[in-house]
Image (tube, helix red, strand yellow):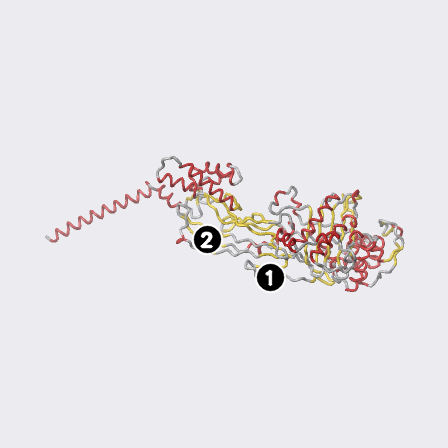
């Protein structure tokens, strides 16, 4: 009896288990075949994503802390095409004007597509970037517009909760934003060639294309790695409504801000240089012009100005990309008479000439190696001082002949010509100095007067600065140091000596000669009322189709003051002044030197070395009460 009861129980249990297995099998079949698309869609709506946290790019500031470049918070606008379903066309229509693009460009980005991922699984696109570096206010407008569009769609309509929820996901969750930054240059064109600009760059990591902002030209490029900082990243999962599932956040690494670059540039001196270049460009119809202001004792560059210029906030708006070139380091020219300084400094150093030595300047024409060499005036016998003051080609050539090819070439090289200066900016060129073994007989009469060689404006300025600095060549400085986001100095750069090129005595004698150029020579227009000035003019014919042109010139003036204890050196150059407006360096460039020098000297409070009864009108005009000066600095 008991055995029969147990048998019945076993049969019932077996039947129940059989029904359970049948039910489970049916359920599996339903999931696998009947509701496959539904469950696949739900699985797709919960997806894993890894994204980067872009580090805040460091600021660029001048020597006084004035802001020259910074990063402003912005947004990258993204979309989840999988959530848009059949609304991609309508979304493109609404978004296009907000993103300042057209529907045709947006629609492919917003459209859903299928592909097989690296794991071999069929997947759809959940993430696409629509536009980078969108201002915060524009993103807020996008949010408001999409929200209002959703309200208009559902207003007055009878919708099921699910239909309403689906529309809400489309218009309120399918378009998202991520943190981004816009590079801002608050002073527009000021020091544009020094600063450079940034541009999107791409990099492929693990078969994924990454986009980041990288520096292009100037300090932005040279110190890109320091400015950029270190990116952080997050690896996490989102649900079907694009809400992060925090418990699934696998990695969370914070970004590290970039370092701030502190320049040797003084924004006020830079502003003065740029302001004073413009009238020269306009008056003489120049192709380009430049100005450099340097501290000879340290090599610090206080200003580096080029015209024409550009706005680094919108570098692509210039018609000619060449405008973005920092011509002070990228362009070379035959320096002409400014180069004579190197020749006479070397001759003084070797002790083969004195200021009072006399040379026959041949009444304006001198034949050497079968070729004539001309002066711009019919000079007769002149002292070395007068040869320098009046820029005699013939007198300088005779000094060089006495110095000899080997020593002349050695001095040219020692002064830094034919090699990069070491300025930490991209694009600097070496210039050209013929190898000594390639010199022909005629070269000793041409190269020492600045023909047959080429140099950048920076090379010429640093060579002259070596004379001002007692014969010691310094490495040019454009960056003073690096500071972290907490204001702690990480790196402090120090002035660097390259080499001694001439003795202190030879440099002092050369300076003495160069003061005569301003006092009663070719640079009378560079005279300052409160300071002694030493300098040299240069007027070089440009080479056109292999011949020296009689219409196109490159002219310059390089001077420093006070001559007794030089604090500032200013180099001015001008490309192709019109002959009818005056084309000599002393006519075109010397007056600009004067205006920059007087304004800069007053701003920096440089002690005069000349006593006069009458104050300088230019300097008085530059003076301002502290409150006004603070306002000017605030604008910078």
Q: What residue is drawn where x is 17% and y is 50%?
A: 10
Which secondary structure lies at badge 2? strand
Can residue 371 be seen in the rendering of this structure?
Answer: no
Q: Disc 1 designates what residue? A: 491
Alpha carbon of mark 1 to alpha carbon of mark 2: how far? 31 Å
Asked whether, in this view, residue 75 is left or right of residue 590, the answer is left
Residue 201 x %, y %: 56, 48
The count of marks equals 2
Q: Disc 2 designates what residue? A: 234
Look at the picture and state if 116 lies above or below 570. above
Please give the label number shown on residue 607.
none
Question: Circle 2: is it few (<14), some (14-19), or many (20+) Cα within 10 Å?
Answer: some
Q: Choose mark 1 or mark 2, whichever is in front.
A: 1
Look at the picture and state if 130 lies above or below 225. above
Asked whether, in this view, residue 276 is left or right of residue 39, the answer is right
Q: Which quarter of the picture shows residue 398?
A: bottom right
Can residue 559 be seen in the rendering of this structure?
Answer: yes
Residue 219 x %, y %: 62, 53
Residue 421 x %, y %: 69, 57
Asked whether, in this view, residue 212 is left or right of residue 158, the answer is right
């Amino acid at each position: 009896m008991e055995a029969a009861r147990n048998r019945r129980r076993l049969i019932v249990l077996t039947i129940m288990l059989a029904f359970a297995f049948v039910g489970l099998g049916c359920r599996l079949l339903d999931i696998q075949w009947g509701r496959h698309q539904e469950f696949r869609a739900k699985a797709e709506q919960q997806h894993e994503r890894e994204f980067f946290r872009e580090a805040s790019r460091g600021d660029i500031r001048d020597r006084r802390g004035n802001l020259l470049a910074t990063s402003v918070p912005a947004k990258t606008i993204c979309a989840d095409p999988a959530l848009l379903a059949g609304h991609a066309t309508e979304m493109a229509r609404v978004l296009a004007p907000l993103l300042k693009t057209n529907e045709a460009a947006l629609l492919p980005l917003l459209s859903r597509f299928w592909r097989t991922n690296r794991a071999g699984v069929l997947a759809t696109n959940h993430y696409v970037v629509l536009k980078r570096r969108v201002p915060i206010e524009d993103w807020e407008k996008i949010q408001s517009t999409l929200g209002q569009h959703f309200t208009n769609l559902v207003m007055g309509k009878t919708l099921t909760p699910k239909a309403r929820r689906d529309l809400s996901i489309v218009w309120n969750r399918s378009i998202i934003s991520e943190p981004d930054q816009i590079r801002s240059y608050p002073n527009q064109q000021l020091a544009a060639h020094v600063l450079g600009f940034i541009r999107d760059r791409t990099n492929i990591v693990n078969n994924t294309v990454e986009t980041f902002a990288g520096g292009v030209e100037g300090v932005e490029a040279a110190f890109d790695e320091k400015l950029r900082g270190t990116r952080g990243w997050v690896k996490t999962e989102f649900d079907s409504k694009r809400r992060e599932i925090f418990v699934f956040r696998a990695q969370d690494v914070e970004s590290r801000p970039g370092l701030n670059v502190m320049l040797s540039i003084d924004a006020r001196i830079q502003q003065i240089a740029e302001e004073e270049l413009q009238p020269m460009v306009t008056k003489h119809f120049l192709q380009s012009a430049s100005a450099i202001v340097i501290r000879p004792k340290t090599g610090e560059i206080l200003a580096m100005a080029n015209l024409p210029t550009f706005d680094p906030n919108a570098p692509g708006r210039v018609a000619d990309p060449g405008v973005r070139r920092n011509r002070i380091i990228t362009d070379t020219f035959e320096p002409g008479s400014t180069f004579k300084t190197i020749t006479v400094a070397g001759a003084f150093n070797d002790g083969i000439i004195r200021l009072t030595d006399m040379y026959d300047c041949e009444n304006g024409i001198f034949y050497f190696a079968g070729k004539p060499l001309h002066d711009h005036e019919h000079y007769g016998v002149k002292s070395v001082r007068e040869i320098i003051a009046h820029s005699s080609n013939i007198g300088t050539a005779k000094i060089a002949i006495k110095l000899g090819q080997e020593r002349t070439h050695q001095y040219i090289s020692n002064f830094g010509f034919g090699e990069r200066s070491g300025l930490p900016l991209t694009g600097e060129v070496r210039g050209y100095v013929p190898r000594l073994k390639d010199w022909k007989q005629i070269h000793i009469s041409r190269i020492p007067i600045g023909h047959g060689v080429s140099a950048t404006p920076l090379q010429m300025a640093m060579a002259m600065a070596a004379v001002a600095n007692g014969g010691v060549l310094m490495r040019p400085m454009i960056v003073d140091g690096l500071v972290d986001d907490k204001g702690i100095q990480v790196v402090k750069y120090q002035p660097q000596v390259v080499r001694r090129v001439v003795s202190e005595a030879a440099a002092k004698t050369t300076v003495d000669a160069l003061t005569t150029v301003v006092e009663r020579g070719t640079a009378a227009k560079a005279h300052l009322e409160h300071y002694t000035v030493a300098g040299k003019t240069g007027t070089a014919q440009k080479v056109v189709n292999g011949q020296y042109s009689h219409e196109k010139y490159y002219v310059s003036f390089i001077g420093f003051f006070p001559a007794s204890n030089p604090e500032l050196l200013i180099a001015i150059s001008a490309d192709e002044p019109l002959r009818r407006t005056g084309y000599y360096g002393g006519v075109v460039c010397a007056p600009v030197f004067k205006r920059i020098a007087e304004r800069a000297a007053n701003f920096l409070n440089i002690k005069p070395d000349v006593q006069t009864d009458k104050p300088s009108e230019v300097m008085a005009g530059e003076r301002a009460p502290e409150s006004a000066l603070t306002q000017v600095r605030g604008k910078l």
